Image (cartoon, rainbow, N blue to C red):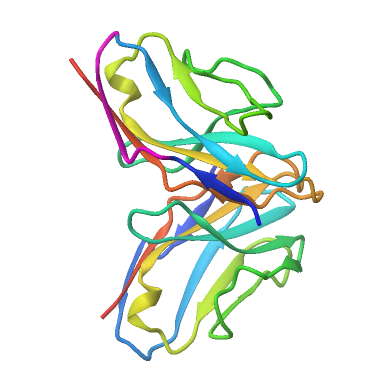
Amino acid sequence: AQRVTQPEKLLSVFKGAPVELKCNYSYSGSPELFWYVQYSRQRLQLLLRHISRESIKGFTADLNKGETSFHLKKPFAQEEDSAMYYCALSGSSGYSTLTFGKGTMLLVSP
Amino acid sequence: GAGVSQSPRYKVTKRGQDVALRCDPISGHVSLYWYRQALGQGPEFLTYFNYEAQQDKSGLPNDRFSAERPEGSISTLTIQRTEQRDSAMYRCASSLAGAGEQYFGPGTRLTVT
């Protein structure tokens, strides 16, 4: 069975501090990993996916297959980064139904 | 263009009533997904369509839940004989193709009293 674990329900940092949102997964094959974000009163939207290897809004995430992790990082947090972040996994079955973690609320204080 | 839309945005119903939740995907999107999100949890997969064909319904919790997409566009998720445990946010997403980025709608907040 596939599973995504986000150990922190809430992460609170000050503006300018580094941020790391943790994500660990369990999957027997070669998964695709994603980070989704939900800003206040907005819909869930894709932040980044591991295969694109992009940096979006200063966030990066590296897939570590040895540690089965896909942590989301940003060197200097901004107040507008405050949101709910979900790590998600898609299996290699040819279509992309997503298995989500429970989410981590990031609060960036001034 | 318009994103994924869902209606109603909020639905309060009494236990035992049937409800129908609607999802209007982005025009031209082949794949459509339904997820359910309980409070404090991440979204949980319910079912998935390619065009009008229901490809996977393994996430539907029991036979009170059903979904259809008869013309390969709008989809309806129906819950019969609602129970309090059905209270949740129901999210719909669509993508151009099976492996494409999923675009989510605003969700329908269902409350069963």
Q: Is residue A91 above or below residue B74?
A: above
Q: Is residue B11 above or below residue B103?
A: below
The spot of residue A47 in percent (x, y) is 52, 29
Relative horizontal placement of residue A63, taking residue A43 as reference (left or right): right
User: Residue visible at 60% across and 53% down?
Assistant: B25
Whether the magenta-drawn stretch holds residue A84 is answered as no
The spot of residue B113 in percent (x, y) is 25, 81
Q: Quadrant of the C terminus of chain A?
A: top left
Q: Quadrant of the N terminus of chain A?
A: bottom right
User: Residue visible at 57% across and 29% down?
Assistant: A70
Relative horizontal placement of residue A96, taking residue A102 as reference (left or right): right
Report the residue that reaches farthest toward the right. Answer: A94
User: Residue visible at 38% across and 61% down?
Assistant: B38
- Magenta residues (range): A7-16
Q: How many discs appear?
A: 0
Which one is nearer the viewer's eye here, A4 or B38?
A4
Relative horizontal placement of residue A23, taking residue A84 as reference (left or right): right
| Residue B1 in view (yes/no) | no
The spot of residue B85 in percent (x, y) is 37, 76
Q: Quadrant of residue B19?
A: bottom left
Q: Quadrant of residue A82?
A: top left
Which one is nearer the viewer's eye here, A103 or B32?
A103
The spot of residue A79 in percent (x, y) is 27, 19
| Residue A18 in view (yes/no) | yes
Relative horizontal placement of residue A18, taking residue B69 as reference (left or right): left
Q: Is residue A106 above or below residue B83?
A: above
